[in-house]
């Protein structure tokens, strides 16, 4: 028996937990498109929290980052809910799949807008650059898959698919807010001989974001390579 990837095992466990709630949504008449729309609205809320943190908070006030992270994780559940509502409610449709993909891209773009706004607003310019690079990688991961499917091949692999991206941003932002509560938002760690801090509280959020900037683009190039191999095998 072939061993399943960890992400598939975790996905199946999550489905077991959420399926009773999914069945409840189906009973009260919730459609997959409605669930997808709720996910978009929640991600608009994530961006709004980041913008509010930039406008109303100070550089060391990382509560906004923490709350945005918590809402990101909650909104991420709706990425799984809409598909399960479609499957368990026998409401799958071609337009529904398109609608889900389009709103997922809007959700991600809007979320990154909020992140970049927050980082620029508090003068984390290098981190804002990595956030933008992560956005480029995230969009290309999705685009390459969609373009390849349009050419008749399927590419789904890589380290930073959408669930991983949502968890990375949500967990790191939430952890940043919690860390700030215990050690303060202005904490800085210096090493003798180095003229700048090697760590500060916001790094709990920005370091994973930087790693994500690298891995999303690696994932995009991995998918591009896989698509090339698949097309060559088809003689295209």
Image (cartoon, rainbow, N blue to C red):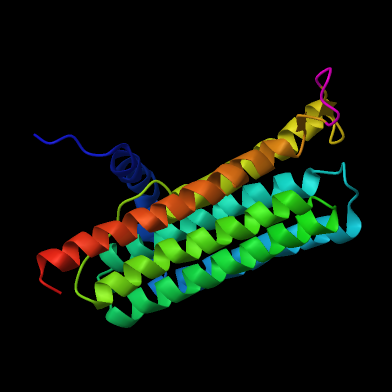
Q: Quadrant of the C terminus?
A: bottom left
Position of residue 210 measured from the top left corner of the image (x, y, whole percent): 61, 45
For the magenta stretch, what is the residue range? 191-196
Residue farthest toward the top in the current orientation of the protein: 192
Position of residue 157 measured from the top left corner of the image (x, y, whole percent): 30, 52
Queried whether the magenta region covers residue 27, the answer comes back as no
For residue 122, say whether it is visible.
Answer: yes
| Residue nearer the viewer, 113 or 20 | 113
For residue 29, say whether it is visible.
Answer: no
Quadrant position of residue 186: top right
Q: Quadrant of the N terminus?
A: top left
Q: Residue at x 31, y 37 (%)?
A: 6
Position of residue 23 measured from the top left corner of the image (x, y, whole percent): 35, 59
Residue farthest toward the front in the current orientation of the protein: 193
Position of residue 5 measured from the top left corner of the image (x, y, whole percent): 27, 39
Q: Residue at x 64, y 47 (%)?
A: 70
């Amino acid at each position: 028996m072939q061993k399943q990837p960890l992400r598939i095992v975790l996905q199946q466990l999550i489905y077991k937990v959420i399926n009773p709630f999914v069945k409840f949504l189906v009973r009260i008449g919730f459609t997959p498109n409605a669930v997808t729309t709720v996910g978009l609205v929640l991600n608009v809320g994530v961006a709004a929290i980041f913008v509010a943190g930039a406008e109303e908070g100070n550089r060391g006030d990382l509560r906004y980052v923490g709350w945005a992270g918590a809402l990101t994780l909650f909104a991420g559940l709706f990425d799984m809910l809409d598909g399960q509502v479609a499957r368990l409610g026998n409401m799958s449709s071609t337009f529904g799949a398109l609608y889900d993909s389009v709103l997922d891209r809007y959700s991600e773009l809007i979320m990154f807008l909020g992140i970049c706004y927050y980082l620029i607003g508090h003068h984390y310019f290098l981190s804002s650059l990595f956030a933008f690079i992560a956005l480029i990688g995230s969009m290309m991961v999705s685009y390459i898959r969609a373009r390849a499917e349009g050419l008749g091949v399927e590419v789904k692999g890589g380290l930073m698919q959408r669930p991983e991206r949502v968890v990375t941003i949500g967990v790191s932002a939430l952890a940043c807010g919690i860390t700030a509560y215990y050690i303060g938002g202005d904490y800085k760690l210096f090493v003798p001989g180095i003229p700048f801090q090697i760590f500060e509280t916001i790094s709990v959020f920005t370091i994973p974001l930087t790693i994500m900037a690298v891995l999303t683009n690696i994932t995009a190039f991995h998918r591009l390579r896989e698509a090339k191999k698949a097309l060559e095998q088809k003689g295209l």
